[in-house]
Amino acid sequence: QDGMNAQELGKLLHREPAEIVKKLFMLGVMVNQNQSLDKDTIEILAADYGIEAKEKVHEDLSDLDKIFEKEMENTEHLVSRPPVVTIMGHVDHGKTTLLDHLRHSHITAGEAGGITQAIGAYQVRHGDNLITFLDTPGHAAFTEMRARGANITDITILVVAADDGVMPQTIEAINHAKAAKTPIIVAINKIDKPDANPQHVTDQLMQYGLVPEKLGGDTIFVDISAKFGKNIDELLDMIILEAEVMELKADPDQPAAGSVIEARLDQGKGPVATLLVQQGTLHVGDPIVVGHTFGRVRTMTNERGRDVKKATPSSPVSITGLNEVPEAGDRYVVFDDEKTARAVGEERAKEAQVEERRKTTRVTLDSLFDSL
Ligand code: GTP
Ligand code: MG
């Protein structure tokens, strides 16, 4: 531990303090028995004795995934949370048109003017309910989360153009949703088109196990026209219905935990990250560890660029105040005090550095061998 002296360290390692001092001398560190040692010196010494000097607490804390999982399980005051929805489908089948339509027609009351700032995710209001949509399907965050076997989406909307039918990326989307065990709601789009054939699309989808409820299956199908806004309310009703069946819940009373949707470096603001709150409530001022970086939430804005003081489960927010730019798909956890957050953050930053150095060393060695 930081600040220990040779005497205390000797006791811990079952060595005479004099031996410790001697050893330190040989390592080029001149101290007496009572002088407190810094962490690096202790680590070097411990390594010399073949002992991992990592403070136990740090070792546990640096496993952010583990802390995250614990946060997700730790749920004392569960309340319903909005569903997090992803729109997927083949090229040109109308994903962006649907998202744009929702963006402009279903914004929160009193916030007319629409979304001024694209932050990769946004919420729409439907009656008394909120629904969180994640923008840009096939986004880096999903790919990254998928690679780790984790998932941030509750429901997948599969958009299939009624005049085009099932296509390669339609099948890909079905497989992705199945792998992630998220329910699919089928939105057969472009039904306004004269050559639209929703029945044919349904027949095709049934071959992939998506059977409409009216035919004895358990998949919800909605015929829509994203371009003309037809049946969009019905689609939103179905999302709410599905969400109710899923009983999506979170505990807003605990410190926040969640995932990074996207992140970038802003010239003026520094690192800016869009976070999805998956557990707890995120507040301005919260000490936070995000991936391999950390900080304190300095500012927090919603998808309309409005400053917000707190963000409840399933809300997407854009934050500043991190030391570095995290990566899409990274997890984050809020800590009760800044000291712990800093300790965990620094530990993780160090790990990342070691990993980076290992990589560069490998590269250097490789190029060295290549040049021989
Ligand atoms: P990618 O992002 O390239 O994968 O495509 P996308 O799925 O986002 O499709 P997008 O929303 O860009 O729509 C493709 C074309 O289809 C555009 O020209 C839209 O105007 C048109 N379109 C989308 N929805 C409808 C619809 O309901 N009816 C009609 N008639 N056209 C539509
Ligand atoms: Mg698009």
Image (cartoon, rainbow, N blue to C red):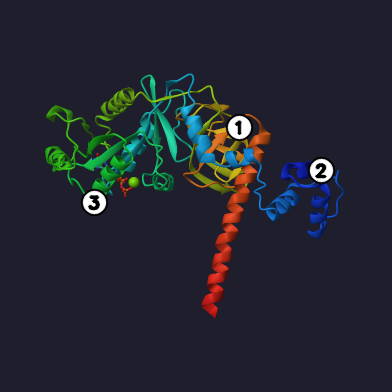
Q: Residue 309 carries which label?
A: none
Q: Which residue type does callout 1 highlight?
A: Phe
Mark 3 packing: few (<14 Cα in 10 Å), some, or many (20+)? few
Q: Where is residue 363 in the image (x, y as percent from the top left)?
A: 54, 67
Q: Distance between the residues labelled 3 and 2?
A: 69 Å
Q: For the residue labelled by badge 3, is the local secondary structure a helix, a strand or a loop?
A: helix
Residue in the image at 53% along x and 35% along y: 67
Specify the quadrant that holds the C terminus.
bottom right
Up the image or down, 365 lies above or below 102; here it is below
Q: Name the residue under label 1.
A: 335
Seen from the viewer's position, the closer of residues 289 and 305 is 289
* Label 2 sits on residue: 7
Front of the two marks 3 and 2? 2
- Give the side of residue 222 with respect to residue 251, left or right: left
Horizontal side, residue 223 vs residue 82: left or right: left
Q: What element carries label 1?
A: loop
Disc 2: residue Cβ within 8 A of ligand 2's nearest atom = no
Distance between the alpha carbons at the discs numbered 3 and 1:
44 Å
Residue 256 position, x and y percent, is 53, 30
Q: Residue at x 82, y 47 (%)?
A: 17
Q: Position of residue 105 (x, y in %)?
A: 36, 30
Q: Give the alpha-carbon distance from disc 1 to disc 2, as whole Å.
A: 34 Å
The number of numbered badges drawn on the structure is: 3
Is disc 2 placed on a helix, strand or loop? helix
Label of residue 168 in the image: 3
**In the image, residue 65 lies at what x, y percent?**
50, 40
Depth check, mark 3 against mark 1: the one in front is 1
